[in-house]
Amino acid sequence: MSIQTVNTKSFPGQRPGTSGLRKKVTVFQQPHYLENFVQSVFDTLGDCAGKTLVLGGDGRFHNRDAVQTILRMAAAHGYAKVLVGQGGILSTPAVSCVIRKHGALGGIVLSASHNPGGPDGDFGIKYNIANGGPAPESVTEAIYQRTETITEYRISDAAAVDLNRIGVTRIEQMEVEVIDSVADYAELMQKLFDFEAIRKLFGGGFRMCFDGMHAVSGPYAKAILEGMLGAPAGTVINGVPLEDFGGHHPDPNPVNAAELIAIMAADDAPDFGAASDGDGDRNMIVGRKFDVTPSDSLAVLAANATVAPGYRDGLKGIARSMPTSQAADRVAEALGIPAYETPTGWKFFGTLLDAGKATLCGEESYGTGSDHIREKDGLWAVLFWLNLLAASGKSVEQLVSEHWARFGRNYYSRHDYEAVETNAANELMASLRIKLATLPGQDLGHYVVALADDFEYTDPVDGSVARQQGIRIVMTNGSRIVFRLSGTGTEGATLRVYLERYEADPTYHHLPTQQALAALILIAEQVGGITGWTGRARPTVTT
């Protein structure tokens, strides 16, 4: 074995987005492309001698090849040890868990999350820091700047490591330990939730369906739900990770998890349904013929958090991304704890969690988590719901309906316009910014505009500022329309339009969501000119 220095040239456009660098697999397969980015990460980190790195991904196409490359580069950079998931697999929550448990310097996550996989699909890479969370913008910007000037990278010429066999091998002077992908994560979950109560729930005939979507959560769900908690065999469907996710889109929403939705809509449906995404950090919660929005899921868990042993002492605060509904804010007010509104991106929760200002966090894009790690966590949310169901003896629909009766209902929906021509999407947003000053006070049919702005966030812990994080149009009754361009796609631009209406009267808590939001949908089109700019008469996906 020897360490080689390889000459290279920079690639344009290697700036990490909301959740790392995401491109088509074919882009990552270009000679030197992955190596340039990884070397830029290591150069930004500086001296890593004697340190530990965690490495794993969601098992999508190109995952194994990328793991081998990164191992050889880590050895060339002086790491003392790399902990890598068996088969190259670690869910994003598990990476965060392992970093924190073993005191690692950080970790590399290989995933494009909920984006499609396979040879023609997407691939991604991001760096997580020592607290287990995504690198802050100061770090990702430094990585990007390094990618612009890089001229060489270092890599060992060692042979490939057997990723299937748990145990220790060496590359150069670096120890490579292949670890059980599930063990550390499962151990943490046992500390947070009442596993005995959940076992009794399943033992009493309770049935559930967990859709792994042929993504990374499958092995975790089988080990914990069927193995440790005694759920019947077959509770986990689509539980074997596949490089192309079985040809499906591993995004846990009612559109892409249609199989689960159909199962839960049947007359003989299980009591509880759930799904997770490509890298295991998202979740969808479903009752019998009853879907739960991510915003409502966060609010319900926050209102009932003390049923779980890990949260028995109560919550320090609740944080949500700006586009997420305000349902959790009402819970925070009732509990007498702070509510924080941050930009989209889990990294913005990290400082709040580290400072002990927040305990539960959530994003409307099916992401929920807490201070147990520094990532959102799909299976954690499912276990929290199971703990709540076991403690209450109520159904999902009962719990949510009772929550609405107490706090009111925030009708909520997201309309996605995917793969919009980038210039058109940017011009739509620019045209909205021009209108912001004139919108307050306008009468828009059923609503009067109270506030219109481009959301800006100053971190209450470190003082960092994030600008242009989404355009908000807030009505005098608290209803909202939010326009935002997503940073997680790899083709064109994705325009997300978020619609929210608060309803206090229980008489009106069971309207079809799109009907309840119809007036706001018309206003969004009227103000944003969505059809004109995008050429789309309707959203690609409505959730």
Image (tube, rainbow, N blue to C red):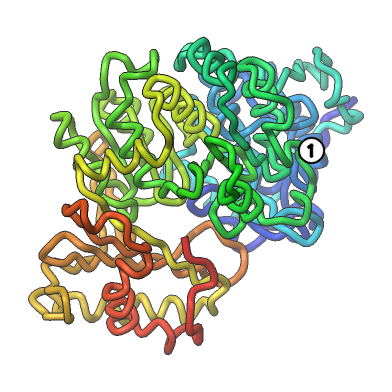
Residue ranking furthest to the front: 267
From what the image shows, is residue 245 above or below residue 208? Answer: below
Q: Residue at x 63, y 33 (%)?
A: 91
Residue situated in front as seen by the camera: 202 or 434: 202
Q: Residue at x 60, y 56 (%)?
A: 14
298 horizontally vs 480: left or right: right
Place of residue 207 in the rendered image (x, y in percent of width and height, measured from the top left): 59, 30
Residue situated in front as seen by the camera: 415 or 466: 415
From what the image shows, is residue 35 above or below residue 155? Answer: below
From what the image shows, is residue 128 above or below residue 542? Answer: above
From what the image shows, is residue 522 above or below residue 131? Answer: below
Note whether residue 242 is visible: yes
Place of residue 9 in the rendered image (x, y in percent of width and height, measured from the top left): 72, 57
The residue that disc 1 covers is: 69
Residue situated in front as seen by the camera: 447 or 531: 447
Place of residue 434 in the rendered image (x, y in percent of width and height, measured from the top left): 24, 80
Res. 530 image quadrant = bottom left
Q: Residue at x 22, y 80 (%)?
A: 435
Name the amino acid type tagged 1.
Thr
Note whether residue 101 is visible: no
Residue situated in front as seen by the camera: 442 or 304: 304
279 horizontally vs 505: left or right: right
Res. 513 image quadrant = bottom left
Quadrant of the image for the N terminus? Answer: top right
